[in-house]
Image: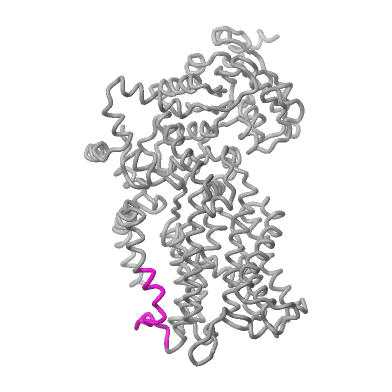
Amino acid sequence: MTTTKTPAPAKAPAEPPRRRSISEWWNNLSRFQQWIILLPLVALIFALPWLNPPLITTEPGYDFSIAMFDVARYCLIAIGLNVVVGQAGLLDLGYVGFFAIGAYVAALFTSPDSTLWKIPYLAAIPLAMAITMVFGVILGSPTLRLRGDYLAIVTLGFGEMVRLFADNVDALRGNRGFSNIGAPPGTRENGEPLFANFDGKPWYVLCVAVIIVILILAGNLERSRVGRAWVAIRDDEDAAELMGVPTFRFKIWAFVIGAAIGGLSGALYAGQQGFMNNQRFDVLTSVLFLAAVILGGSGNKVGVMLGAFVVAYVPLRFLSIAEWKFMIFGVALTILMIFRPQGLLGARQRLLTYGRQAYQRLVGRGEVVSSDTAMAGGKSLMNGGNGAPK
Amino acid sequence: MSQKDQHRHISGGIVAEVAQMTEAERREHEAEVADVVATDREFAVGEGETLLEMDNVTVRFGGLVALDSVSFHIKRGEILGLIGPNGAGKTTCFNAMTGVYRPTSGRVLLEGKPLGRTAKYRITRKGIARTFQNIRLFEEMTALENVVVGTDARHKTSVLGALLRLPRHFKEEKAAVEKAMALLEFVGIADRAGDKAKNLPYGYQRRLEIARALATEPKLLCLDEPAAGFNPAEKDELMELIRKIRDDGFTVLLIEHDMRLVMGVTDRIVVLEFGKKIAEGKPEEIRNNKAVIAAYLGVPDDDVA
């Protein structure tokens, strides 16, 4: 306890300025330069399961490629949940419900155990997204008139309802579940299917590719009228409405888009597992998803992926402590909320397509001049540093 | 601090350029800015005609009558002051106009058409924008982003359009940023365009609220105590800004406690007390109105009888 506590205060004052300068440096790079730097990083991320680096690897306890797929899956979920919680500020405790619907749609339309007609797995993915979007509207339209805690309770109920449906509706086969769920086409040299559930590598690559696409699309939304409406709603819903934002409509959209990403990750999960029953969609999973978002920094896409990595990876890497994971995460979150309430990386969104050029022209500087870490200590100090021209 | 300032000037940007302009250049630049800020909406009423009318508006909260059949009108192009002691119903009046409260009875008419039960965001789009008595900015956004949210009130990009970046998205984004930058210059806070709203000094926040409201291209701009917490010098600057806004083609409704400011800037004044309108007229008439003086200073008991 003492060992963890001593370095913390020593680090705290030094950390914010350092992080700020890195982000400032990054923001002042052109898009092209940013891509140049990102490309090798992306390549490295894609290559991870093959590299299987020592220390980082989860083997021999747990297959590393499958572990990495799990991490990627959590990242995707965190990005989706971040749209709802981080950007629009709608506390959703039943996100696992959307995840479950996506998984069940994939199972129902591809598993031989289901009585429905079958479609290829790759067609089941968009279908899963479409159906979860419909559920997003169904859940959202009556409940999004509620705010804060009330909304959280209703969404919690929604998550449980989905699980109970899976338990009790015969067509969903409860505990018996669905086996032989479909996978993308492709075979190996030895004739086995490429996307097999014993090998996580192809699934991991697929999932990372999906994440990149989703990140680009989510970025498009963020740097547009939609992202601004969401953040406006999060910051002050009444003021947003009075500034001409149709708040209800954009809240529904946040729900629907979050739901679609949840459904997508559910469908990927079902495909990789190859078997799906009612045992994996409890409230705890929902809370774990939310913990990833809060831990990493609600409202910050990089942050939530970092949070998802921690939440998914740590229990797989250290199998001996896996059964303690909820206690460890609980303690970690509590400590984090005391010292860094905004999460590992604070909320930061860029909401303008031409923001970079605009700031450059107005004040001759890349981007955000003021600190992201205003909630942390040293706020006044840093404001003084920026100085109001008086 | 001085070193920082130096850096700001050297590093360039419009703000630095303006600081080095000659008087004539600066005037020309300001005219350009004002031109971008000015609204180019079509009005159903001409200059000097009634833009907004409060027609016997009553707002009741349970047993409390916050507004008691208040009627007045605002002419296009004027600055109307709305004054009254604390609790007189000024902000309630604002809230009834902007759709926050529904009048218990009576009507609010914009350009002769009743607002009825129009949703709040639609009222904004129809042309009434407001600031708040207690500042309510989007704190996590930069100043520029705050203003662009205001311009979004007139935008039509759909979620799909933004997701796929259709041409309209780019067109609107470009226009919005141009307008927002001009607005920040117009209200005089462009030097901190990139700062989060919560980190701005108080005076900047007040001005940012005005810029954000103007960005919705309102036909009527309602300012709810914009000078609260200002020192005399800042109040003078604000008066100047309000006049500039009017000269740019906006109609202004101003709630304010500071008499010097109200008397100095308004064309007409409406006085409320206990939810009732007790006087209406030009500033000098209001200044000498017995009922108004009584409302503000009180009257000896024997005079009332």
Number of numbered labels in the structure image: 0
Of residues A227 and A337, the one drawn nearer to the viewer in this rendering: A227
Where residue A225 appears, x then y in whole percent? 53, 46
The residue drawn where x is 55% and y is 13% is: B267
**Is residue B104 placed above or below A113 in the rendered structure?**
above
Q: Residue at x 55, y 63 (%)?
A: A80
Residue B259 x, y percent position in the rendering: 50, 17
Rendered image quadrant of residue B178:
top left
Q: Quadrant of the N terminus of chain B?
A: top left
Give the residue at x 49% y 64%.
Answer: A213
- Residue B135 vertical placement versus A200 (above, below): above
Residue A113 appears at what percent x and percent y?
A: 71, 84
Q: Observer-nearest residue: A18 or A73?
A: A73
Residue A24 visible here:
yes
**Residue A56 within the magenta-colored segment of the rendering:** yes
Residue B26 left/right relative to A46 = left
A32 displayed left or right of A144? left
Could you say which is closer to the camera, residue B210 or residue B23? Answer: B23
State which region is magenta: A41-59
Q: Quadrant of the C terminus of chain B?
A: top right
The answer to whether residue B147 of the structure is visible from this angle is no
Q: What residue is shown at x 33% (from left), y 39% (from top)?
A: A363
> Looking at the image, which is closer to me, A124 or A162?
A124
The type of colouring in the image is: one colour
Relative horizontal placement of residue A91, taking residue A72 as reference (left or right): right
